[in-house]
Image: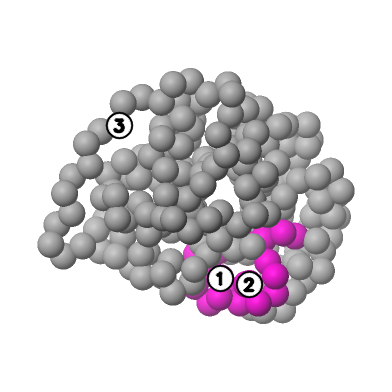
Amino acid sequence: MAPSSRSGAPLDPRLVSVFAEAPIVASVVGSQPLRQFLTAPARMCILASFSVGQLPKVVPALGRAGKTVFVNVDSSPGLAQDRGALEFLKDLGAHGVVSTRLSLIEKGRPLGLLTAMKVFVTDRSNLRRSLDAVTRGAPDLVEVMPAPIIGRMTAPSRRALSPTVAAGFVETPADVALALAQGAVAAATSDPRLWQLRRDQLPPAPPLAPIRPAPSQE
């Protein structure tokens, strides 16, 4: 089954085929796991902890291998936090950028970059701030951390934070299956073993816990 967004907004066409076979985002932290990603079914990666000097070699090589490359701008040593950095990544052939910063998400779209906003949902007030930022930034993907919190959200919050990539504490194929059952289009993980996981290899999703009614202030 092709991935889709529960919000009703379609997943960007550039990403539909990316997640069709393998609903996995490879979080590639440093250069050591690159070889494992190159041979994995997972087609999309988020590069983290790559210095500005490494990116001109790594990004084009992954693109030539048919991979969809996002760069975590917040965790790339030496990379500025401005439009110039996004233009630099675009020129290298990066397909998208990841950031917690609303300003960078807003600057990415006019450049033709796909954007993924990373949000950390640690409490109810943080959730409200995340909902506001995503509404304003309208990113192509929302990387929600930690993944287990998705099961604690109300249905309206899940829809608002979509298309969702579940990240953090994604450790088993069952974790991936649960994230997809809860509405995520993919799950992100730094575990190379899960980069090998194809959609048709997923176990049955565990039963979903009942969603609590939304409190009046949410």
The vertical placement of 149 against 205, above or below, is: below
**N-terminal label among 2 and 3:** 2
Residue at which label 2 appears? 108
Structural crowding at the residue carrying mark 2, measured as other residues with C-alpha within 10 Å and reported as few (<14), some (14–19) or many (≥20): many
Whether residue 96 is in magenta: the answer is: yes
Task: Tell me, yes or no, if residue 39 can be seen here.
Answer: yes
Q: Which residues are magenta?
A: 94-113
162 relative to 196 in the view: left or right: left
Snapshot quadrant of residue 196: top right
Q: Secondary structure at mark 2?
A: helix
Please, what is the three-letter code of the amino acid marked with disc 1? Ile
Q: Residue at x 63, y 72 (%)?
A: 108
Q: Return the residue nearer the eye: 198 or 73.
A: 198
Say which element carries label 1: helix
Gap between marks 3 and 1 measured at Cα? 32 Å
Look at 48% across and 59% down and name the residue there: 9
The residue lying at 55 percent from left, 75 percent from top is 106
Q: Amino acid at mark 3?
A: Leu
- Locate the C terminus and report the quarter of the image it occupies: bottom left
Numbered label attached to residue 105: 1
The residue at which mark 3 appears reads as 208
Labelled pair 1, 2 in contact (Cβ < 8 Å): yes
The answer to which of marks 3 and 1 sits earlier in the sequence is 1
In terms of secondary structure, where does tag 3 sit?
A: loop
Q: What is the crowding at mark 3: few (fewer than 14 residues within 10 Å), some, or many (at least 20)?
A: few
